[in-house]
Amino acid sequence: MAAAGGKTYSFKVVLLGEGCVGKTSLVLRYCENKFNDKHITTLQASFLTKKLNITGKRVNLAIWDTAGQERFHALGPIYYRDSNGAILVYDVTDEDSFQKVKNWVKELRKMLGNEICLCIVGNKIDLEKDRHVSVEEAEGYAESVGAKHYHTSAKLNKGIEELFLDLCKQPRRFLTLSHTVMRALYNTTSKRHDGDGSGRGEVKGERRESHKHSPERRTDCRR
Amino acid sequence: MAMLTTLVCFARVVCLCRAHYVTRLLLSWCMNCRPDVQIQITMTNMFLYLDKRDTMNQRSERRGIHVDQSELLCKKGCGYYGNAAWQGLCSKCWREEYQRARQRQIQEDWALAEKLQREEEAAYVSSHSSSQTQPPQSHSQQSLATFSKFEEKKTNEKTRKVTTVKKFFSPSSRTAPKKVPPEKESEKQEKEEKLQGRRESHGENLLRDLKGIFTQPWEMASPTEESHEGKAPSPSITRQSSIETDRVSRDFVEFLKTLQKPGREVHKQSRGFIESMGNKKDLSAEELSECVQDFYQGMSDRLLNHFKGSSEKVDRVMDQVEKYIMTRLYKSVFCPETSDDEKKDLATQRRIRALHWVTIQMLCVPVDEEIPEVSDSVVKAITDIIEMDSKRVPRDKLACITSCSKHIFNTIRVTKNEPASADDFLPTLIYIVLKANPPRLQSNIQYITRFCNPSRLMTGEDGYYFTNLCCAVAFIEKLDAQSLNLSPEEFERYMSGQASPRRQDDPAAWPQSGSRVNPALSQIHHNLKLLSNLEKRQQQVTEGAQNLETELAEWQDSVAREVQEILERYPLEIKPRASAIDAENVENDRLPPPLQPQVFAG
């Protein structure tokens, strides 16, 4: 966020979704334009960056993959703190993964307020014949929670470019959004320093927020 | 090697001149700068002693004293006993020695400062005509004010300390000389104030400020302090750390030289900040963090707006600033006493230790440690995460985490033959943390969160790995039966140590799981198997031996019985033998009479 004052904008986007819905394939397709390829040059597909040029502005997009297994669900807040956008991926052939997305949306709204930019992505549309989540249901839901909906296929390379481009096209909105979000977060979580209105306050508040998770967890595990 | 030989020769020469302390200094320099040549230095030391002994033997007046005894004496030959902690000097000589070294360091720093001052003046002259002049005067005065305040506080502290010392020692005649330090201190303070009152030129300010930098704030005026109170800190430790901080300071100055004017500004600000932090030791960790973060923010804003630097350049400068500041502040702000970091460290450490039984299978880690390259990378990852604790700068610590993560990615790629996703990465990282049990994990995480430059922590790749580490720690803290796919009872039993997950497998599965977990364990298992085999065989042997024994006994019996039977069946009868040979010749009578000799007339 410190870089926002310069010419380059940094954006952090988290990828959320159950395991096996194709999060990794999605980013690999986007950043390397490869699918299930043995010659993928990257060592890892959990943190990828892409430099974009959108209407004359340099944008550094950082895509953070998250562990989708159920047991890591509680760690979500640590990942998506300070992010500018969230991509929620589900598998169109898997009804459960769509329910998971609904849970994520609820949680994100609760933690980061109502203005966080969410993109709901139905992946694997190449398996249309096995579709278990209807298009109407998904798009209707997305609209009801104020999120954008995309249909993608990492295998056929459909809709992915569009998804990420759309995401980056509102940099200014993202920026102000994330500041507001952080401010909100900051005000709700740390009452001690509510007088601080400086630009860094959001960041600090956010950091403090992250510390506060650990004690709660500790009590959890004692039970 | 050639250099070492010269060193040895030099040591000999110097030793012959009996200026031992120079040699000592030389040696201590070697010790500090080149730990790898320590062995050779010990050899040099030996030469030194040998030489010394030779000279001693030549001088007859010392003959009465045993050589070992002479080793105990002060190396400067003042007649008092020396101490190994003071490099073989007596307390008095050591103090002199130490002060001299400090003095020399200060002089070096002054020389450096003067160089800077000349540049500053040159820049000042050139920029004087231009209208764009920042108000350096007011700024330096402000910093001076804090400096003198700090000095005052220091003096007060010292006076207090001295009076306590006075109280401890009985109020005898010794009190009079003891009073000297506070007086001297107050003199010094007066001098400082006078100096301040005089409003020296800009350059002089800088000079003194620089002096302030190169002697650490909490060590300010330490030479006098040490000489008066004899409170010299353990030289080896402080020297080591001061060498490191000095190196960082020098690097920092070198780096800032390339920036010219903004560089000086940055330098001044950083120095002022460190001084002000010296006063804030009582603050809580969060407040300290806020101070540092405010400073980072102010500095980068200033660099961006005032000096119109590009964001990459600003980031580079900020990295250097962070390195400089945090190296200096590390000791006072890492795991501070005001926080409960240490308690958390211990809790985490205990927790990880209690979870030693967690296996790769439970965490679903996609790593096959039987592949040599994989186990190699696992070891490297563990080393890296442990090494994190030894770094001072938050960014260096982050670099350790990143390097650890890279090794983890390598293990996954080798095992699965595809790029690692977060689904694979996080469990593996958790596994690595459990295996490594890194020292002071919580303290390090808190330190990084508090004092790292936020722009790096929030968005970059390092930030991602750091976030994952935080996740791993959070997961370990709240880890329960469900997250390992175990029943609560099983989890309870494993946690309490009543059962071990490896035992419950059927014996056939034992060897595989054992070898995957640990080569030592598999070795033990192998040995156990061998032993049980041996035992079985031994039993067989004993059984065989017993059988043989009974068989033998039976055989003996049967033989005896047979013999008996035969004996019974054919009893031995011995007929009495005839007493004379002819006794039995019953028919002798019927024999014709023996031939009689007949005489034939012839």
Image (cartoon, coloured by chain):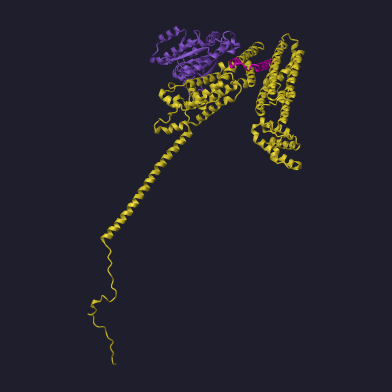
Report x, y in % for residue B533: 41, 40
Residue B547 in picture, x, y percent from top left: 35, 48
Viewer-proximal residue among A200 and B365: A200
Q: Nearer the viewer, residue A3 or B482?
A: B482
**Does the magenta run of residues contain B284?**
yes
Q: Quadrant of the N terminus of chain B?
A: top right
Horizontal and vertical percent for residue B88?
69, 34
Residue B327 in which image quadrant: top right
Considering the whole magenta stretch, tell me its main secondary structure: helix
Q: Is residue A89 visible?
A: yes
Q: Is residue B445 left or right of residue B182?
A: left
Q: Is residue B558 magenta?
A: no
Q: Quadrant of residue A55?
A: top right
Segment tinted magenta in the rendering = B265-289
Q: Give the number of callouts.
A: 0
Q: Residue furthest left?
A: B590
Residue at 28%, 88% in the rendered image: B598
Chain letter for the yellow colouring in the rendering: B
The reply, left or right, for residue B214 in relation to residue B285 is right
Residue B435: x and y in percent read 50, 27
Work out which residue is located at the far bottom of the displayed protein and give it. Answer: B602
**Colour representing chain A:** purple
Vertically, is A15 above or below B593? above
Q: Quadrant of the C terminus of chain B?
A: bottom left
Q: Is residue B257 visible?
A: no
